[in-house]
Image: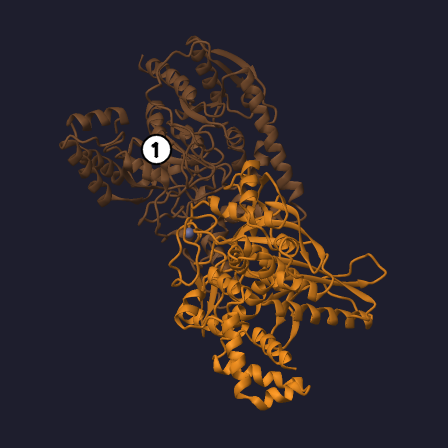
Amino acid sequence: MKNSKYKITIGLEVHAHLKTQTKLFCRCPNRTGAEPNTLICPVCTGQPGTLPVAGEESVLQAVRAALALNCKINKYSVFERKQYFYPDLPKNYQISQYKLPLAENGYIEAGGVKIKIDRVHMEEDAGKLVHRKSETLIDYNRGGAPLIEIVSAPEITSPEQASEYLKKLRQILVYSSVSDCDMEKGSMRCDANLSLNLKESSRLGVKTEVKNMNSFKAVENALSYEARRQEELLLEGKKIDQETRLWDENNNRTAGMRSKEEAHDYRYFPDPDLPPLVVQETVVEEIRKSLPELPASKIERYMGEMGIGEYDARVLCQEKEGAEFFENAYSKLEDKKKGVKKLSSWINTELKGKMNTEGMDFKNIQLDPGSLAELVNLIQSGKISGKMAKDIFEIMWNEKKCPQEIVEKRGLSQISGEDKIEGLCRRAIEENPGLAEKYLTGKEGTIGPLVGFVMKETRGQANPSMVNKKLRQILDGKK
Amino acid sequence: MSNIKTLRKSILSGRTTAVSAVEESLKKIKSESDLNCWINIYEKESLEKASEIDEKIKKGENPGKLGGIPIAIKDNMLVKGMKTTNASAMLKDYVSPYTATVVEKLSSEGAVIIGKTNMDEFAMGSSGETSAFGVTRNPVDTERSPGGSSSGSAAAVAAGHVPASLGSDTGGSIRQPAAFCGIVGMKPTYGVVSRYGISPFASSLDQAGPLAATVEDTAAILEVIAGYDRMDSTSIKREVPCYAENIEGSIEGVKIGIPSEYMQEGTETAVRERVLAAAGILEKLGAEIKEISLPLTKYAVSVYYIIAPAEASANLARLDGIKYGLSADSGKDFLSDVTASRTEGFGSEVKRRIMLGTYVLSSGYYEDYYIKAQKARTLIKNEFSEAFKIVDLIFAPTSPTTAFGLGEKTGDILKMYLSDVFTISANLAGIPALNLPVGLDSKNLPVGAQFMGNYLSEELIFRVARALEKEIKSSEKQ
Ligand SMILES: [Zn+2]
């Protein structure tokens, strides 16, 4: 779309499953993985006479999410009934929010741009249909689980930015512990609206809605496809139909839904079973205070206060647990100013590399951040070499011991005593008279093999730069 | 059957037993099955419960405020393990998976649930004639309607099958049948009684309440079923007053307004006369009678027939034949199955209201109907608030007519709807209202009058109604 005469406008509607003990309107457990229809009650299966009662925990989590997304919380919001017949919807209406949502006017910074969030509202999830050969079964375990819907303004200008926005959104929600946001598992779902219009025009074109995208990559691919499809139609002078299209992952294309399936008049009206939801200012302030430091301000602090480069700071902050690991280790550094860069690169390369190959993450690693700080301290103080540190790290990872202990037990401490080094160097010169002779005649390259001799003799424990320096000192004295 | 107070004394003193009270009730029910006021009778269960109560009394334990008293409940209230049909073919075999809060409360005070009473299908009707289980007959005159929708609950009490019953009132469904059958019935303030476990008709208007032979019994039942319920977010958090205990007392100086709009030609002469005569008694008892005006009353029916069907259309959407209830197989897709089940399961009055409700909520009509009706509802509420600045209670006919004949209005829907013209306003405003029998017309049919009060004024209503009831009864004896 780079050289196109059209520009893209995208709006995203994201559903995120809230982490809570219970469902939104009944007190059934809110979790996944249980046997079908074991986490249900009369309320969440739509029995006659049952009434919804909004769970405080769900409301607080939704407020938390909205605050993390810089939204203004509405003191009064209203639950409404969104009506349509579908077998996974026990009451044949979904309790959602419509005219008065929980929160409005937030934003996310993605790729250096502020993207406006129009609204965040609460609603209940539907059950799950399980299709078998000739029958369809319904599992209501998920029915009534708390969701928030986050609606962006139509301000996203490319599929890449859409994906960037989603990653940021997920990062913030996970950081704030309101959701797992796992797109593959369905705890985060995304629908998109996309339209094209002429670059010089400010009037938005006809939009299509794209659904069924189950990963960030799918969102990017689906929207790229949809933008190209619309562009081709427009270039041919054809019209865009306002419709819902489903992303077909296997065939890499979007396809229109049958219009019958999408022609909905939801007949929203305020749910008379639920009084307006009131969120007091004091509650909002309490939650605001309890919010963790979010990635954007962490990155800023790491770069400013600690002097870490932007790339490393971003990588450290990718996950909340990673940032916590780093900050924990950082607090135990002896020389924070000098050690911090080494520490961040150790986390971002060695540790993350190890985690990747072993399929671990910050939530389940056994490594103590204090040990990693100690390892960096040992390197900084010259007690061990970088090469040795890698070996020690291996042992730390496998045996869960602290580096000091490993160094002592295995006699791995680096030899850096002046006298000891001098003795070793003199022996090296004595036993390699040819190399020493060559050096004295000006072929200084022979210093390498001499250093190597010392290192071999000491099984790598000598401080190589000290050896190098001492050898030169002795030989130069002989000149 | 004797009233609750007398029966309770007899059971506690050992002059009779809970079992024999229940047996008497069951015998009466069987001998008068032609009234068709019952859908299900819990013979075995109620006898078991009664003997438990007798055991308790023998052991000197407290059997509860209603220990051993047989009580009927409307068949839109759920009792775990028992059928709750809502008098609809849709739910004719539906077994309740849980128990309604009101039923729990009755049971925990020792009441014996004798069975479920007939009603208009899903509480939609004013005559007891829309039931899928056949019409209920008025014990006063079996060719006449007992009123509706709590037709069976009113008829069962009036016939003496049970001393008291529960009904639900969305637009007059307790008060109008109480008036037609000549008993007492109260719709409490919206939120006083939990709606949990009562199949809804219109959630913002529905309120369950007691029907009984006397004001005192009515108060005794309300005292048991009232109270905040964490399962109902619209129930009011407040301590329940001792309604029955505080019932006797002077009504000196109580200001009572009679709205002129309720006393015009549309109201039968005999009804007007009886109401005015009762007002005379109230005055004699020291109350101050005033004529007031509630001009918005004339819009109540129109407002009601937008809001109630709108809510009902959504409330009844869950009856799709998928999870429970009548399930028809269209041989086609999901929506066709749902359509087939609902076509077969619902009666025509229910269908009419679902269509009305769907229509007024549809895009393009929502603003013109639903929103406008909500605004009018607010005006009606305000009109009552203004009235209650001038008077303490409002006294008016419950229905413009006495019991009409079976089949008399089924052909004219509008006429049927208009028979609720005096009861609907209290539901729209959410205020409490109680029907009290105030005499008979020339055909010896009961005339009912209602007291309407401000929010949570049940105690005052009971006290004034009790005073009037006493006077009327003593003058009848003379
Ligand atoms: Zn549940």
Q: Secondary structure at mark 1?
A: loop
Amino acid residing under circle 1: Pro
Q: Residue A155 is drawn in which quadrant?
A: bottom right
Name the spot of residue B199 as percent of width and height, x first.
Answer: 43, 44
Instruction: Return the residue found at the far bottom.
Output: A434
Report crowding for label 1: few under 14, some 14 to 19, many 20 or more residues within 10 A (C-alpha): many
Residue B46 in percent (x, y) is at: 24, 41
Q: Nearer the viewer, residue B144 or A403?
A: A403
* Chain the render paints brown: B
**Quadrant in the picture for residue A230:** bottom right
Task: State left or right for residue B413 relative to residue B458.
Answer: right
* Rendered image quadrant of residue A243: bottom right
User: Residue A408's x, y, as percent?
Assistant: 41, 68
User: Could you say where residue B465 lies in the image, as x and y percent from the top left?
Assistant: 40, 19
- Farthest residue, direction right: A200
Q: Nearer the viewer, residue A203 or A331?
A: A331
Nearer the observer, B4 or A456: A456
Q: Mark 1 and ligand 1: say if the CB distance to the nearest ligand atom is below 8 Å.
A: no
Above or below, comparing residue A234 to residue B267 in the picture: below
Quarter the N terminus of chain B occupies: top left
- Residue at the image position 23 percent from the left and 33 percent from the top: B68
Chain letter, orange in picture: A
Q: Residue tagged by mark 1?
A: B139
Q: Residue furthest front?
A: A478
Q: Mark 1, chain letter?
A: B
Q: Is B144 situated above or below A293? A: above
Q: Quadrant of the C terminus of chain B?
A: top left
A58 up-or-down from B210: above or below: below
